[in-house]
Image: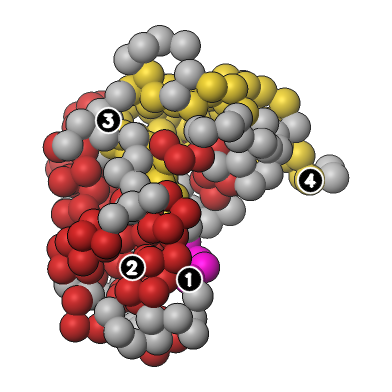
Amino acid sequence: MSERNTVEIVDLKKHYGGHAALQGISFSVKKGEVFGLLGPNGAGKTTTINIITGLISASSGQVKILGREINGKYPAGLRNRIGLVFEESNLYKRLSGRDNLVFFANLYGVKRERIEYLLTEYKLQDAAGRAVGKYSKGMKKRLLICRALLHKPELLIMDEPTGGLDPISADIIRAAVTDYQQAGKTVILSTHYLEEADRLCDRVAFVSEGKIAGLDRPENFKRKYQLDNREEITLQDVFRIINRPD
């Protein structure tokens, strides 16, 4: 594994019975890069994220994170170097926002000052004493960001972090991605929002039907396929253009 790469994926495949969720995808993520997985629901983005995070095993292929090979099980100490933000909230709803963070801070050995800093940074200080079950969707997602950043991980993995959120919460989370990268860290971002990928990502892999249909810098895609000249373009338009015969 190159010292410049935080993540390396080689010929990754995943089968569920007769269905091929992933059909041999390969990519690498450079240190300090925001790397986007862009595609519609069911394209294979979440399956890829679940394999990278060790939630499921690949049928075949190789995954290396921070120089360590995984396949459904993380080597000792690796998980403490990674922060995860899943699409669905997995917070403790009966606990307050602050107590959710205290619970995980104790696992990581993080000081109380870090909790209060994050609550303030992500505009949750006023709601920190309330039960999470009473939070809005945007507040829950911001709390998930706080939890993921508690231990200052080297790699942040985010699955559809702004899906269905109000504009204010979405902007806060996008700013978090930018700030995290500016601190020299690496981000893998799964999204189906073209504007979000264009705004945040250094490179984007377009995932379609379990394959990578294209991988490049957003500005190179726009230049190659003349997307800058279109007033409005949908995700379906992009895949139709990328997949069309030359």
- Give the labeled residue for mark 2: 143
For label 3, the SS is loop
| Residue 16: assigned label | 4
Disc 3 packing (10 Å; few <14; some 14–19; many ≥20): many
- What percent of the width, then of the height, locates residue 172? 19, 63
Assess whether mark 4 and mark 2 are in contact (beta carbons under 8 angstroms).
no
Residue 90 on the magenta segment: yes
Q: Between tags 1 and 3, which lies in front? A: 1
Q: Between tags 3 and 4, which lies in front? A: 3
For label 1, the SS is loop
Earlier in the chain: of badge 2 and badge 1, it is: 1
- In this view, the residue farthest toward the top is 2
Q: Amino acid at mark 4?
A: Tyr
- What percent of the width, then of the height, locates residue 132? 40, 81
- Give the labeled residue for mark 3: 33
Disc 4 packing (10 Å; few <14; some 14–19; many ≥20): few
Residue sitting nearer the eye, 176 or 103: 103
Cα separation, mark 2 vs mark 1, equals 9 Å
- Give the labeled residue for mark 1: 91
Earlier in the chain: of badge 1 and badge 3, it is: 3
Q: Is residue 112 above or below residue 182?
A: below
